[in-house]
Image (cartoon, rainbow, N blue to C red):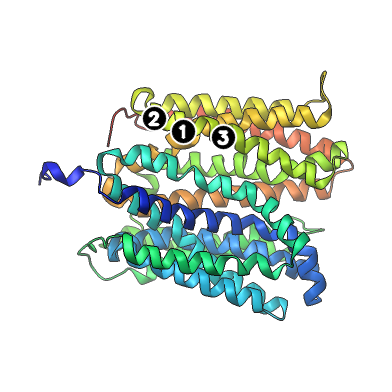
Amino acid sequence: MIAEPAADEPLAHRRIVFGIVSIALLMASIDQTIVATALNAIRGDLNAELTWSGWTITIYALGQIIVMPLAGRLGDQFGRKRVFLGAAVLFTVASLCCSLADNIYLLVVFRALQAIGGGAFMPTATGIVAEQFGRDRDRAIGMFTSIFPIGGIIGPIIGGIIVTYWSWREIFVVNVPIGLLLIALGLRFIPSSAPKAAARVDGTGAVLLALTMLFSMYGISSLGGSGAEPTDPLFIASMVIALVLGFLFVRHANRHAAPFIPLSLLRGHGFGAMNTINFLFGAAMLGFGALVPLYAESRYGIQPLQAGTLLTARAVGMICVAGLAVFALRRTGLRAPMIGGFVLVAGGMALMSLAPHGLTPYAWLALAAGITGIGMGLSIPASNNASLQLAPDQISAIAGLRGMFRQSGGIVAVSITTTILTHSANSGTAQAYSFLVFAAILLLMIPLTLLVPDHRGTW
């Protein structure tokens, strides 16, 4: 059925709606890293063990990975505004509860609830942006989804300021007024989307997918603990259970008339290649970002606050290029900016692994981080649009899967790298080699881009 000409027109309040959902996405991404600077304060105030304090970060990442594909599917089926506002309410209430927690166990539980709300923002908001901008959805989505990595970069800086001048509880309190404003503006300006007529929700598939991700990511994240070994019974048991559940999920999806996640979105034309790219993208870029400050401190003795600003250098490079890359997409297509961006990021990582030449260590690392930021700004808008244009009617589900694969790749990279560093005699040198591995992964992604359908113009 051919849509009427007016159906693809951008809507009147699209810029206001873009601002509203951008606040939500930025808030969720900041909360992914902001707690890192408060771990010592949380540990001391709640008399918690370091392992349990670390779970305040791990559970948030795990929760988002599990929720992203589920929220995307629910948003497509039951209406994105409804799911988005429900996520905003849950995120706000959970943030308030986190600030009031009087023991570490309650804090971890409330962080899990916060992760459910935060993880639902990306896929539902992506669908809302696509609806609002009509034929300009490609540019709007490219700009919108570039916000998420920025939040992860500035999170530790904001957290450091709040912990220094207030306390760790205010890290969560600041979300409450922002969340209430978000809910009020969403109710007023975000139009309701018509739910799709569909069969009953595939609850079995949803549960199998969630448990598969939970056990696999729990097992992999356990490798990042002190003294962790790949031979640990906990790791082996978690991965065996995940493999069994994954097999059951795939078998169920093959047999079900309306599976929760259609296998065509996992391995269909173009999707299989992009899912692999997104996983490796998360491993190289998210893993890299998490380890840069540690590398600066351990190899060159740079102070923590100064080391954290290296991520700011990367953010500046990314912001400067991303806007231009978004508006050039219709001319360049999707493959060229992805390939160019991957090469630049790989080059920046290779420079970072080398000893400084003619510059101070900080200046050398800042230059390398800036180059990686330029590469990210070039590649992210294209990679964000690459699979969405293949099935515009399932934007939220695809965005959720994209986030799941990227976050999973990041957790895998950080866990494996930290395990290697724990067992290395010189962690700084070992980490330099890890950056070369990340660079090689990015270069290996280039042939995969040739399997993704190129696209020019609107979609």
| Camera-nearest residue between 234 and 101 | 101
Query: Residue 177: horizontal and vertical position, in percent?
Result: 53, 68
| Camera-nearest residue between 134 and 223 | 134
Query: Residue 275: horizontal and vertical position, in percent?
Result: 45, 44
Describe residue 453's horizontal placement relative to residue 111 as left or right. left
The reply to whether dot 2 and dot 3 touch (C-beta < 8 Å) is: no
**Res. 193 image quadrant:** bottom left
* Residue wearing tag 1: 323
The reply to whether dot 2 and dot 1 touch (C-beta < 8 Å) is: yes
The CA span between labels 2 and 3 is: 15 Å
Describe residue 224's horizontal placement relative to residue 331 as left or right. right
Q: Secondary structure at mark 1?
A: helix
Amino acid type, residue under disc 3 in the picture: Met
Which tag, 2 or 3, sits closer to the chain's start?
Answer: 3
Amino acid type, residue under disc 1 in the picture: Gly
In the rendered image, the vertical position of residue 131 relative to residue 186, given as above or below: above
Amino acid type, residue under disc 2 in the picture: Phe
In the rendered image, the vertical position of residue 190 relative to residue 137, given as above or below: below
* Residue wearing tag 2: 327
Describe residue 313's horizontal placement relative to residue 328 as left or right. right
Query: Residue 206: horizontal and vertical position, in percent?
Result: 40, 66
State which quarter of the image contains the C terminus. Answer: top left
**Res. 428 image quadrant:** top right
The reply to whether dot 1 and dot 3 touch (C-beta < 8 Å) is: no
The CA span between labels 2 and 1 is: 7 Å
In the rendered image, the vertical position of residue 295 relative to residue 327, given as above or below: below
Please tell me the numbered disc located at residue 318. Answer: 3
Q: Is residue 263 visible?
A: no
The CA span between labels 1 and 3 is: 9 Å
| Camera-nearest residue between 233 and 360 | 360
